[in-house]
Image: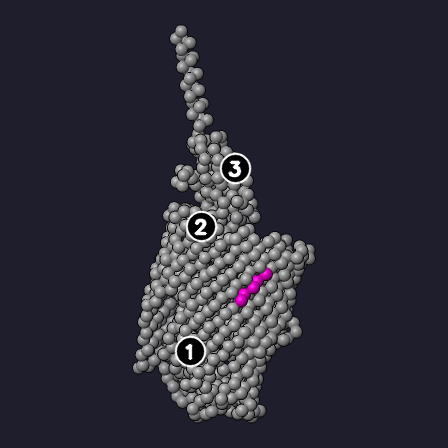
Amino acid sequence: MVFKYGINFLIIVLFSINTYAQTTFSIQGTVLDQQKKSPIELTTISLILKDKIFQKVTSDKEGKFSLKEIEKGSYVLKFQSPGYTDLIIPIHKLSSNLMLNEILLEEKIETLDAVVIEGTSDKLIEKKMGKIIIRVDSDIMNEGASITDIMENIPSVDIDENGTILMRGSTDVRIYIDGKPAQISLDQMSPVNISKIELITSPSAKWDADGSSIINVILKKNRERGLNINGNFSYTQGIFAKYRSSLSANYTIDKFSFNSTLSYNKSKNFFGGRTEDFLNDILQITENINRSDDRAFTFGVDYFLDDKNQFFVNYKRNFSSPEAISSFVVNDIDRNFHETDYKYNNHDLSVGYKKILDGENHFLDIEAYFSWSPSDSESERISEDNLGNNTLLYDYNGSGNFAQFNVDYQKEISSKHSFDLGVQSSFQDIDQFLQNTSINNPTFPDFALDYNFSRNILAGYFNYNGTFNKWSLRAGLRTEYVKRELALNTDNFDYDYTQVYPNVLVSNTINDANSISLSYNRRLVRPQHWQLTTIPKYFSPTSFAVRNPELQPSYINVLELSHYYQKKGFSLSTTVYYTNMNDRISHIQRPSDANSDIYIFTLENIESDNAYGLEVSSRWKINNWYTTTNTLDVNTAVIRTIIDDQIVERDFTSYYLRSYNRFKWNKNNFQLNFRHKGNAVFPQGKRNPYGKVDFGYNRKIFSGNGSIAIQVYDIFNTYNPEYEIRTDNAYRLGLFEPESRRLRVTFSYNFKSNKTKNIRRKKRNSIERRDVNGVQF
């Protein structure tokens, strides 16, 4: 009897244990890169029950993970990994052990609301809320190119005959490198290190309020495990030869990632032109030769303490010593030589810390950025007689320092609502000594200027992002206090102000193919420090410049309406915008009081400027071997200004048409670009239309590890801008003749070690929902 009860009791215990074992389960799987199929280490896997994290683990070096002791029920499985889009997998009524096998994560690009205008694997242009992303590597014409060539290929961006960057017809664009203000000339950068370029037409409140729009250059950040080395060399032949070379390497091991780049650029460029003044009977012929010798070095370290803490340090050093030689012939008699030597020496240092608080979209960012130029200099020697005797000497020596500190906090309230806020402070100091020494030159008397400039900015911002069914909202407010101090010898021009800058962007997803957005931004344009000096600056025998220390900021209101359409093989983006700018800073020309044959260029705040624009971008993949991308920029503006007590009002319509045509044949890629610029109008004149045609070819070699590219710029040599100036005192026609037709050959090779596990720096990832089979919904 005892034995019988004992057997029954044992059966009950075993049954109970078995029943308990069957009510707790496990989930296992392996996390892989979607394209490379390589394991992703340190992926955070969260098991969520009713919006609360029930259990959390991280993947190992082989990408494997295991969640254990899970009770029966319905859960949400969330995958988060640095540099990848978050993935959510719903699990309905878990009642047994679950083996997910391969979990494929897609590399993160940026945020939601993207409309791809070009290609799939060959994406060229991508439209997102408030900005356009240009993938530099996807354009054949960019291989081995200078930054100027790259910018010329970008929709909405223009490079004028003086090398100035314009966006939507305005020179008030601000340039950033990895989200930090550029403190060097872009041509001093190594273009091979550029990953993509963002054209931000509707910046959030996080961005500095300065500038009508923003161009953000994003550098490559290779975090592949092991050693990776890339070499690049390009040779360009125009009138003169030019060389570009770079060597970059990164090494990632355990929790450290090291990267470094060396680059060297040597170039010699020609720029010619002629200007004819009919009222004063003056013909001036100009020839310019510019030499450049640029070197750069970068070094950076990322340290991933764990999946919640990351530190980084990046250092850059730039050396540049350009030279310029100009010669002028006026009425076939007077010959003038103008020689200029520059020396630039710049250091950049950025340090930062990122803390993931609770999931990828809840974090704290702290960053400090320093840039200093201890010994910049410029020296000019000008002679205005046939014997080459110096008649004017100009010397400049100076130093500059810039520091910026950011503290940013972002929190995802729910899958549909988030906010971010932060504070930013920046400090800029520039000390210069400038001197003109005249040798029998009545136009330029001796002049010495001790220039001291400082601008300190304290700012705070708040952004809200929300999704309401098919509607999305981004609203933000930025407040800035600015204190500017300027001392020119014994004269002081100090100025301080506080302003608020609201912005709002509303979008609606009409259906799978159509979406629209409407945005408003208030911004300003601050006078740049070089626009505030008063020393005369020599241009040519018939012109010089004197800047204006009393310039005030210009304030801008921008309204933008966009429509996106996308179907398989075809995409279309259309944007219309309106810009109102008060007290715009504009270039003004007037004759010299001492000599009416000489013109003075200066800067003034004009009364108002209104502009309307249309931007259209389309991409059509006609078949597997031919894809065409076309863009049209139309700008209509009304400029009203006061010059010498006279009201001048001008209105104009200009356009810029670009066509990018990609052809594929076996392993060969071809590209044919067409560009046509319409006329441009400024307060006292206009520039006539012109255009050009470019051709490019590239091919992968050495089993895909290397590539060779050939480009021909301006095949028909038609890039010859003409301009016209009409005033009460002059009627002038000018023709620019740059070194536009060029041939470039580029070779690059990439060495990679066998290990390719990716542990990229954490980014602000959006959430993409999929079921267990990877089907997006």
Q: Count the numbered circles shown.
A: 3
What's the CA distance linking mark 3 and mark 1?
66 Å
- Residue annotated with mark 2: 468
Disc 2 residue type (three-letter): Phe
**How far across and down, in percent of the image, does residue 628 sit?**
63, 61
Nearest the viewer among 288 and 566 is 566
User: Can residue 617 be found in the magenta stretch?
Assistant: yes
Disc 3 residue type (three-letter): Leu
For disc 1, the neighbor class at 10 Å (few under 14, some 14 to 19, many from 20) is: many
Please report the residue visible at 44 percent of the width from the left and 23 percent of the height from the top.
Answer: 19
Q: Residue furthest right?
A: 665
**How far across and down, in percent of the image, does residue 580 sit?**
44, 70
Check whether the beta carbons of the residues at disc 3 and disc 2 lie within 8 A of each other. no
For disc 3, the neighbor class at 10 Å (few under 14, some 14 to 19, many from 20) is: few
First of labels 3, 2 by sequence position:
3
First of labels 2, 1 by sequence position:
2
Q: Secondary structure at mark 3?
A: strand
Please report the residue visible at 37 percent of the width from the left and 62 percent of the height from the top.
Answer: 478
Q: Secondary structure at mark 2?
A: strand
What's the CA distance linking mark 3 and mark 2?
32 Å
Q: Main secondary structure of the magenta part?
A: strand
Tell us which disc is closer to us: 3 or 2: 2
The quarter holding residue 143 reads bottom right
Report the span colored magenta. 614-618
Q: Vertically, is 175 above or below 704?
A: below
- Residue annotated with mark 3: 100
The quarter holding residue 283 reads bottom right
Disc 1 residue type (three-letter): Ile
- Residue annotated with mark 1: 606
First of labels 3, 1 by sequence position:
3
